[in-house]
Structures are given as C-alpha cells and as structure tokens.
Image (cartoon, rainbow, N blue to C red):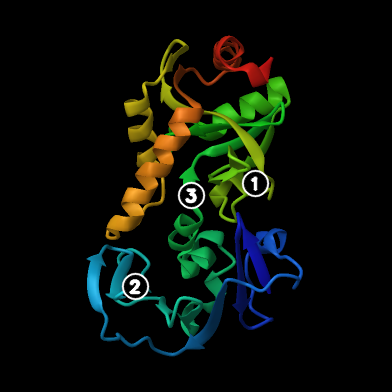
Amino acid sequence: MNIKCGELKFNINCDKNWNIPKNVGKFIVNNEDYPELNYNIEFVNSINKDNRQIISTKQDLIVGSDGDLETRYLFIKGANYPYAKYTEIDDKNISVEVLEDFKDMFELDTMFWSLFALERHMIQKKALVFHCGYNSYKNHAILFSGPSGIGKSTQSDLWKENRGAEILNGDKCLLLKENNVWCADGWPVCGSSEICINKRTKLGNIVFLNQGKENKVNKLSKIEAVKKIISQLTINYWNLDFVNEAFTIVEDIVNNINVYELICTPDVRAVEVLERCLEEGETWIL
C-alpha cells in the first residue's frame, strides 16, 4: 500500500491479512506517484543484532548507526528483547522485522507506526510531529499542547461544544509549511482519543495549557515559545543535524505564529477568555 503523510510518500509491503489500525486507510493514496521510501515488513521468530555502532539507548529504543543509515531495536518498556527491528538498507529501502509473537498487537496505532521512524524522515521535509490536541476553528488550527493530563482533550471538547470547532486529532499533528504558510496536518497516531482526521489547516496559533482556579491568557515571548514547542516535539536527540533543524523550524514558526499560555478551568469560562484574547490579537478569527 502507498501512504502519504504530510509531503512524504512511501510504500509498505506487508502481509495483506495483517490486522493493522483502521486509520491507516485514511492515509492511503493511489499508485500515481513513485514512493520516496519502501518498507518491507517480515515476521520472524527471532531478531538478531547487527554490527552497527550503538549511538542511543533508552528503555524502549536502541539506535545503531553506520554513517547515514540507522538501525532501531524497538522494545516494550521493561522487556529484555525487542519486538521489532528497523534497518535502513540504503536511502530508499528499509527492512522491518517483527516478532511473530507480537503480530496481533499492531492494531494499536502507536505500536504500528513505531515501526517506521517517520519523524526521522519528516525532518527532511522540514516537518515536525507535535504533541497536541488539533482543532479547526474558522478554517484555522488551534493547537492545545502541554504535558499528558494537562487538559488538552477537555479544552478541545469545550471548543467543540461551545464554539463548533472540529477536533481533527486528540493527540498529535504534523507541523509543516505550504506555500510559505505554516499549517497543521493530519497524523495517523491519535492515541486514546480515537479521533484521527487527515486534514490540513492553516495554523492559527498554539496554546499551552496550565490548570488553575481562574482563567488567564499570556502571550509567550519567542524564547519561551521555542522552549515550550520543543518540549512537545518528537525529536531524535542522538542526531545533532535533526536537533539543529528542529530548532530552526521552530524559530520560524514563532516568528510567524502567536503562542500563548492559557491558565484555565475545565469549563466554558476558559473558552470565553481565550476567545477574547484571540479576537484582540488574531486577524483570522474576526
């Protein structure tokens, strides 16, 4: 199947009877364009380590490198052996080995898309994966972000219920530029929200949340905004070129888009306070 995420086109060759997330279908495209990447997925009984130098070790990921090519060993936290291995054969062809014992677990979008290292390839398109609630209001994206549990889903729901906003993804979006305008785009990982709509929208603003007893909006300085956005991106910190490019992209975003902090209560008063602020500071919302 041919997939398009953002501006990246790739082919996934796998068992047609494999149970994968239903949202994958929203990103399938016709065979009109030649894919930039080819993934070949094979189910195996064991995963062997290759000779590439280990450059990063985490609980759920070990990364090896051979020049510009990467190997990734993917783990469930606490396990002592990987459930999959991602190997770049060259700059276009990637081999993915998946343990047969885990085959039935890939209906979970986080498991399935972990196999493809998409953020590594998106950065080459100057696009970044952003942890947020992605909402569309007046044909512009309002992105609610912050640590897990801070209230992104609550604020998204409040805007839907009280202002008719459309929730496009409850967990992530892709940040990219189209015709020199920053946009939010659909992403195939939506987590527990189960809301996944593949739609591109002009980026209106980004709102970082904090819980409080009263509602207050602060416009963040560019330095504060960069720090906040970086904290919620999927970044390969073992890759210095990736990190530098991510900072360059984020600096461009904050030079063009307002970023706010919303201290808020979990009710419609938060919507009213943020809306007043946006009406004063954003021409697109009027």
For label 3, the SS is: strand
**Residue that carries the numbered disc 3 in the rendered image:** 129
Q: Which residue is mark 2?
A: 68
State the residue at coordinates (65%, 49%).
196
Residue type at mark 3? Answer: Val
At label 1, the amino acid type is Ile
Residue at image x 26%, y 86%? 51
Please tell me which of labels 1 and 2 falls first in the chain: 2
Q: Quadrant of the C terminus?
A: top right
**Relative to residue 118, is residue 33 drawn left or right?**
right
Mark 1 secondary-structure assignment: loop
What is the quadrant of residue 223 in the picture? top left
Q: Give percent across and percent down for residue 139.
A: 71, 31
Q: What label does residue 195 carry, if any?
A: 1
How many numbered discs, if any? 3
**Percent x, y of residue 100:** 49, 84
Labels 2 and 3: the sequence-earlier one: 2
Disc 2 residue type (three-letter): Asp
Is residue 97 rendered to the left or right of residue 286? Answer: left
Q: CA distance from mark 3 to mark 1?
A: 16 Å
Secondary structure, mark 2, is loop
State the image coordinates of residue 157 (x, y, percent, origin top left): 63, 30
Q: Nearer the viewer, mark 1 or mark 2?
A: 2
